[in-house]
Image: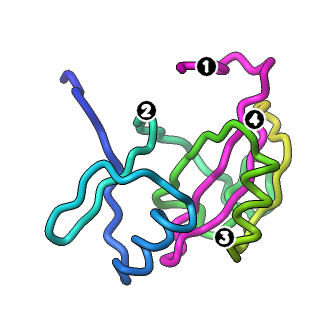
Amino acid sequence: MEILSSRAILRPADPDAALRFYRDVLGLAVYREFPGGTMFFLGNGLLEVSAHAAEPGAEGATPDAEGAGLRLWLQVRDLAATHTGLADRGVRVLREPRREPWGLDEMWIADPDGTRIVIVEVPPEHPIRRDVR
């Protein structure tokens, strides 16, 4: 199977609140709008299928107890500035920025429906670091 493009599809309980969060709070650029929906640019889209730790607080654990479900992974250039900007907009940070054992700097937030969003900065020395400008 050859994949030509991909996207994550959210079906929020409150579409207007989700639209405001992704457009106004996170500042994602609108790709297109259509009756009943809005598509946002997310950079390059990838699907990650990964295990989760069963115990909260265990190495590699997600911040919620159940662990399963959709997560959005958004890479930024400056995690500290992003953290400050989101906090200034009233976004509740579920996990403060920190260096993970796999070498990425991450923080966790959630959208109005509780969808977990990991905000990532790839350090210059990390093997996946690429500047695609």
Query: Residue 29: x and y, percent?
Result: 42, 51
> Which residue is painted at 80% across and 18% down in the image?
125
Tell me the mark number nearer the camera, choosing from 3 and 2: 2
Tell me whether circle 1 and circle 3 mark residues in contact (CB < 8 Å).
no
Work out how far the residue at label 2 is from the one at label 4, CA to CA, in angstroms. Answer: 18 Å
Badge number at residue 110: none
Q: Secondary structure at mark 3?
A: loop
Residue at screen point 41% across, 38% down: 47
Find residue 131 and name its label.
1
Q: CA distance from mark 1 to mark 3?
A: 35 Å
- Mark number, residue 65: 3
Judge whether 45 appears above or below 94 on screen: above
Q: Position of residue 104 (x, y in %)?
A: 75, 35
Q: Nearer the viewer, residue 31 or 43?
A: 31
- Magenta part of the chain: 105-133
Q: Earlier in the sequence, mark 3 or mark 2?
A: 2
